[in-house]
Image: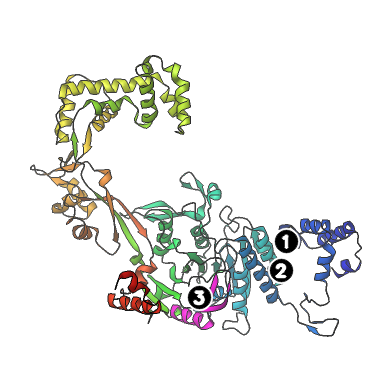
Amino acid sequence: MQRLHDTATNNQQILQANFEEYLNGFSPNVREIIDKFKLKSQVRHMAAKDVLLNVLEKFTSSYINLTPFEKLDPEGRKLPPLSNLGMGYVFEELIRKFNEDNNEEAGEHFTPREVIDLMTHVIFDPIKDDLPPVMTIYDPACGSGGMLTESQNFIKDEEGEIRAKGDVYLFGKEINDETYAICKSDMMIKGNNPENIRVGSTLSTDEFAGKTFDFMLSNPPYGKSWASEQKYIKDGKDIIDPRFQITLRDYWGNEEPADATPRSSDGQLLFLMEMVNKMKPLDKSPRGSRVASVHNGSSLFTGDAGGGESNIRRYIIENDWLEAIIQLPNNLFYNTGITTYIWVLSNRKAPHRQGKVQLIDAGQLYRKLRKNLGNKNCEFAPEHIREIVNVYTQMQAVERPGDEGLAAQVFDNRDFGYYKVTVERPKRLKAQFSTERIEELRFDKSLREPMQWAYEQWGEEVYTHLAQHEKAMTDWCEKNELNLNTKQLKTLTSPAAWQKQRDLLTAAAQLMQAIGTDEYNDFNVFKKEIDAELKAAKSKLSASEKNAILNAVSWYDATAEKVVKGITKLTGDKLDALLAHLGCDESQLTDYGYFATDKKGEYLEYETESDLRDTENVPLKENIHAYFLREVKPHVAEAWLNLDATKIGYEISFNKYFYRHKPLRSLEEVGADILQLDAESDGLIREILGL
C-alpha cells in the first residue's frame, strides 16, 4: 500500500487499476472478504470522485500506526502498535455506530462486552477443571465474531483463571455479508481458521450438518420474521428439516411428532433448536455440551400449549437440558432497551442440578454509564458478574433485600408445565318455524351477501335468467371487495346452486306447514317431530340439508333443555376400560360428560356448545379432576371435562416469581404532598379548590 502511494500519479484511472491489482494479490480467503465488503466498487467510486489518493494518504500516514509493531512518527514520538485486540475494538466500535445510524434491530449484530464476559463465565467456570483437550465453539448467528473470539480469549488467557492448554477451534455462521467479512477477517487477524466461518442463513441451510460442538454461545436476532425461510423448514404442516423435528408425549403418554417451529414473525427459538441439535451426545462425549443464548421475553412465554414455542420449551425442559435463565437489566444493549435473558443449557447437568431450573433476576444489578452509548445507559461491573456467577455456580436461592440487587429461585422442571384442559358445557336450543327464519335458506351460507343482493335486484329471474346478470353480479362483488375465489364465483353464477337453495327453502316451508309455528323449549322433541315428518313424507333430504334447516330455525337459550347427543351403554369391560382411561370411578363419570339415566349401564351424552367452551390451565403437579371440582364445578355446575382434548404446555414467568407488591401510599401522605406543592405554588391549588 505504501508503494501504491509512493508511485501514484494524478491519473485516477491508473491509480484505480493499480489498487485493484493490489487487491487481487491477496489469498482467496481475503479476496472473499474484499468481495463481501464490496471494496472494488468503493475503490471505483472513490476514484470517480477523485478522493482515492487522499484516502490512501490517510492509511499510509507516518503519523498513524496500523501495524502490530511499535514505530516512531517523523518527530521521533513513539506510536503504539495496533494489536489484534485493538483491531477488534475498532471493528466493534464501527459496528456499534453502524447500528445506531441504521436503526438496526435488537441483538442483530453487537453484544456488549460485559454480557459476553458473563456468558463465558457461566459456560466455562462450572467445568474449568475438566475441559476437553480439543475444544470447539460455535455461534450460529456470529455477527462480527465477538462471542467466538472473546470465548477463546477467556479460556486461553495466560493470566486468567482457566488458562487452558488445549486447542480451540471456532465455528460460526452469519447471514449479513459485511459482518461476515468482519468476522472472517477478525479470524485471520487472530490466527484462527477463516474456513470455519460460513456465510448465509443458518435456518435455511444446515451448514454444519452432522457436526457437534463442545460449547455454543449466541445472541440470535429476535423479533425478526423467518417467513422467507419457511419453505426450507416446512412443507405445509410437515417439518422437513430434521433439526426441528421432535417427539413429545401426549396426555396419555403416547409418543407423537410435534411442531417445533415458532410463529413466522419471530425465529429466535429456531436458533436455540439449532444449538440443541449440535450438542454432543453423551455416549460419544461424556462431557456433553454447554450452551448460552440471549433472548428477549417472548421466548419465555409466547405461544399456547401445543404451539411451536411451547413445544420447544417443553422439549428442552423435559429432556432436563435447561440449567438456568438469567434476566438482564433493561438498556444493557446498544440498540434496544427491552428486557433480555440468557438461557443456559447443558446435556450433562451436575447431579445437584438434575430435574431443577434456576431463575436469576439480575435486572436490578447494574451501574449507570456516565454517557449513553445508543440505548445503552448501564453496564455490569466486574463485581456484578462475580456475584451472578457465584449464585449460579452454587445454585443458590437469594432473596432481594430491597429494590436493588440480585434475586434467585430454584424450581423443579415440572413447575413450569401445565395442562391446558378443555371444559365443555351442554348445548341448549329453542326452536320455532317462521317465514323470516326459513327465508335465510334461500342463500348459500358462504355467499349470503352477494346472493341476497342479486335476489333483491332481480327477484325470481335469478332462477330463470341468471346468465343475463352474471357480469353485473361479478362486477358488484369486485366493487364491494368481496374477494371471492374461482370456486365461489362459479357457485354464485350457477343455476343449479340457486335451485338447490330454493329446493331447501321449499322443503323447510313444507315442514313448517306440517309442524306449525309453535316455539319449542326442548330441541330434542322438536327434532323428533321433524324426523317423523320427513319419514312419513319419504323425504330425500340429506343429513346436511336437514341440519341446515334445523340450524336456521333454532337458537341458543340458557333456559332451554339440553340437547341430547345420544345414549351410550357402559357395562363390563367397556365400562372398566373407560374408567381406566379417565382415571376415575363410576360415580365421577358425570364430571367427564357421561350422565347416568334411570336404566343401569345407560349414560346420556349431550351436544357441546362451542361458544361456551372454555379452557383451564392446570399446573402439572395438580390433579386435573381435583382442580375441576375446586375451581370450575362450584361456578358452572353443568360443565364437564373433555380429557381427550388436553394439551401440555410450558411457560416461564419472571414477573410471577419475582414480583414484589408495593402497597399504595395512604391518602394522608398523598394529601400532605399536594399541600406542600400548593404552598410552593403560592396557594394556587387552594384557590382552585375554594379552600
Q: Is residue 382 above or below residue 50?
A: below
Say if the magenta span includes residue 352: no
Name the one closer to the observer, 437 or 38: 437
Residue type, numbered disc 1:
Ile
Over which residues does the magenta segment extend? 366-392
* Residue that mark 3 sits on: 122
Q: Earlier in the sequence, mark 1 or mark 3?
A: 1
Q: Which of marks 2 and 3 is nearer the N terminus?
A: 3
User: Residue at the location (51% across, 83% down)?
Assistant: 383
User: Residue at the location (34% across, 31% down)?
Assistant: 445
The disc at residue 188 is 2
Mark 3 Cα-neighbour bin, 10 Å: few <14, some 14–19, many ≥20: many
Q: Is disc 2 placed on a helix, strand or loop?
A: helix
Could you tell me residue 510's position as x and y percent?
A: 21, 20
Q: Would you say 467 lies left or right of 169 here?
A: left
Q: Is disc 3 placed on a helix, strand or loop?
A: helix
Name the one closer to the observer, 255 or 285: 255
Mark 2 Cα-neighbour bin, 10 Å: few <14, some 14–19, many ≥20: some
Q: Earlier in the sequence, mark 2 or mark 1?
A: 1
Residue type, numbered disc 2:
Met
Name the one closer to the observer, 126 or 15: 15
